[in-house]
Image: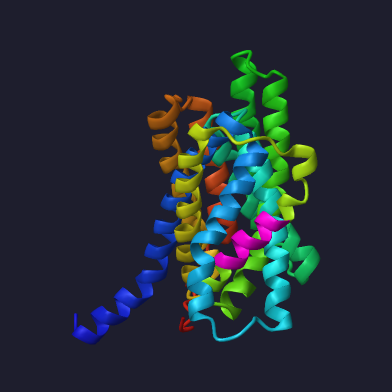
Amino acid sequence: MSQAAAATTTSRLLPFAAAALGVGLLSLMDAFMKESALLTGAYTATVLRSLMGAAIIAPIWLWRKKGWPDKAVLKLHLERGIISAFMALSFFYALTKLPLAEAIAISFIAPLIALYFARVLLGEVIQKKAVFASFLGFIGTLVIIGGRIGKGEFDTDVVLGLTALMFSALLYAYNFIVIRRQSQMAGPIEIATFHSGVGGAVLLLFAPFLGTVPQTEALLPIAAAAALTVTGAMAVAWAYARAEAQALVPIEYSGFLWASLFGWAFFREAVTLPTIAGTVLIVAGCWLATRKSAAGINDNSD
């Protein structure tokens, strides 16, 4: 292989490496956030994570910025920030009720839901394989839930956790549509700044009703989660600016492996056979729905 060809291959692989890094960092962030939410409540932990994240990245953006985002870009920042705020809150609440790997596995249905959002919002035609893929994802979800029912663990907490998780998955699916446009119009630092800043500001409005005094022992894991959120979000944004979403989405599924590892390391959570079987079905459905003969790579610069 010539030096030029090797450089081209490396350039094409970099977005996928960045996406994989981002998934790993964000999976570790989920573990820290579960710990924080159990200590001080999902709402307080989520708000503090967003505000700490903004405090970390905003000074860098202010130092580097070339001007305030124009109206179109600012609208995307606000849209994703609002979506992400409630997506994160509902997901972290679900983590207080469900094992980490199980929650991550069920959240994988988001790419399948995104197909139907694309049909409604973008007018895309849903192919037969996508319908079959959705069926696989639905069956996989039922397998995971059925595993809990079979063990007699389907109590009120599980119902609340699953309800919050499904709501988060709906928002995450819509997020797929927004992030691709956002990543092509703004750099990773700007995206990470508004992602944390807008999300924190939106959630802060509910402080009089949901806020609690944060527990001291929760502050360190929240700070770690904030730093991981910023770095993970920047890695993902950089990747999505350079490769098609449908090419990168399958990398999201590596999050289950990380969640299994971190769930065991942090909370001694065992991964059950129904969870593994359901995950295989969901991932198979997502792969079928998103696979393409040739993944497109963009050459957008930072």
Q: Nearer the viewer, residue 33 or 98?
A: 33
Query: Residue 55's quadrant in the figure?
Result: bottom right
**Residue displayed at 49% across by 61% down:** 56
- Is 98 rendered above or below residue 235? above
Residue 109 in sight: no
Q: Is residue 140 magenta?
A: no
Give the residues in magenta: 192-201
Residue 209 in percent (x, y) is at 80, 39
Residue 190 in percent (x, y) is at 56, 73
**Residue displayed at 26% across by 83% down:** 5
**Residue displayed at 59% across by 53% down:** 50
- Determine the residue located farthest toward the left in the rendered image: 2
Query: Residue 98's quadrant in the figure?
Result: top right
Q: Is residue 197 magenta?
A: yes
- Predominant secondary structure, magenta span: helix
**Residue displayed at 53% across by 38% down:** 279
Left-right relation of 244 to 128: left
Q: Nearer the viewer, residue 118 or 76?
A: 76
Left-right relation of 133 to 224: right
